Amino acid sequence: MIKRSFFSLAAPKLTYPILTTPSTKPVDIPLPERAQLILDHPLNGPLGIGVGDMVKTGQRCGDREDNYFISPVTGTVAAISATVGYMGKNLTAVSFKVDGKDRPDEEFRNSESSSELERVTRFLGYLPGQPDFSFLTGIRDNLKTVFVSGMDKDLLVSTNSLIAKTEFAELKKGMAIVRKIFEKKRIIYLLPEGVRPEGEIEGVEIKQMPAVYPQFFPKIVMKKILAIEVPTGIRCDEMGAGFLSAEAVSNLGKAFSSGSIPLDKVITVIKKDGSTAFARVRLGTPARHIMDVLGIKIAKGDRLISGGPLAGITLSSVDAPVCGDTDALMIQDAAAAPPISAAHCVNCGECVRVCPAHVPVNMLIRLLENKLYDEAARSFDMLSCIECGLCGYVCPAAIPIFHYVMLGKFEYERARSLEVQNA
Ligand code: SF4
Ligand code: SF4
């Protein structure tokens, strides 16, 4: 495996949008007639709920501590089925026929006598903003720092910037909960240079980073703020740092203030002309419903992308639901969408120059095109990729390098876990 010094940011200097005056209030999208939750595990056993069962909004469904979901709506379970996600990952889809009116479930409210940690672990793992609370359990004792990021993962996406700008009170409350859960840990609120929160937040340090893509990616933050280089193939939490989005922390604050589980997701909608709007939608709402309400037409051949222009993922259906981590939906006009490229690498080196992790992308892509994932990891540093998408963005041959790398990492990890199982 190649060992390299970490990160330098090469051209092009792509800057994140900074919200200075968020005059655009999110459009409230009415409840859809049908909603769907995608659970991040295969359908390989009972879910503790069945087709035809009635559910209430915020109801905890599931009969195991570590395997549950929160119903986003009031209605009836219409279907439970196996489905396939990005990279062929096996997932579970739960569909609901939605009643017109929410009837809130009270179990979370009635759990007030439990500790913050117990309530978060039992009820709040699926908040909008997709909090990764896995570090609450497994490695909690080794955790030294929790970052709360007020910036977004891709260009043109401003969901977390909007939350940071408009939900200070909720964020402050959420950070107080984070401090209680992670007693004696360092809590750092990340904001772009030039942006300050409305006031002080007790026990929380404010750190600013240049608003240049991809400076807010966790491994770069670790290097810049903590002077810790995260080795290839190692996660940030294994090195003592957890990351939460501003939206997740704000929703944590709302949950503890209101006694009900927040289920509305703020998304940035990136239109065909590159202009953006915000929408507030219930988790599980199909993308088609949002576009219909906003009056955005999706024509044959247009692409619907979850995320932004650099690292977004094309959705296979306009009925794909909004999930906890859907920060943006982008519509790409059929005429503007680059065709699926059959071109070969011309070895121009642009991808190598732009890669912040110094991956020799021009060599890596040759192995990935030939499905040589193990060698790609061992010889060409595939696992150092931080998944920023810059390589694909600059490639003159329009090779979907980012998706090749994502597939390569997925297949490599799958092969490793099969080896462990069969050992
Ligand atoms: S996505 Fe491409 S440019 Fe970004 S870190 Fe990975 S290989 Fe490098
Ligand atoms: S940018 Fe594209 S064409 Fe240029 S070296 Fe990289 S993969 Fe090859």
Image (cartoon, rainbow, N blue to C red):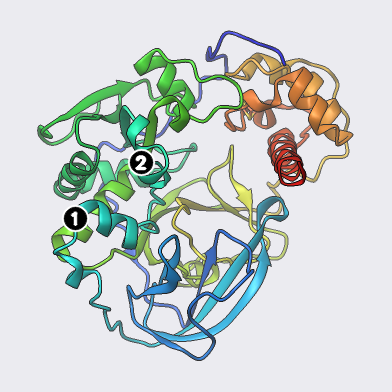
Of labels 2 and 1, the one closer to you: 1
Q: Residue furthest front?
A: 423
Q: What amino acid is at disc 1?
A: Ser
The C terminus - image quarter: top right
Which residue lies at the image location 49% right of the left edge and 36% below the top edge? 155
Which residue lies at the image location 44% right of the left edge and 43% below the top edge? 157
Residue 370 point in image, percent of width and height? 89, 34
Q: Is mark 1 within 8 Å of ligand 1?
A: no
Lateral position of residue 379 relative to residue 50, left or right: right
Element under disc 2: strand
Residue that badge 2 annotates:
244
Element under disc 1: loop
Q: What amino acid is at disc 2?
A: Leu
Residue 392 point in image, percent of width and height? 69, 32
Viewer-closest of 66 and 103: 66
Choose top left, top right, bottom left or bottom right for residue 114.
Answer: bottom left
Residue that badge 1 annotates:
115
Tag shown at residue 259 = none
Position above or below: 167 against 104: above
Q: Residue furthest top?
A: 5
Which residue lies at the image location 77% right of the left edge and 45% below the top edge? 422
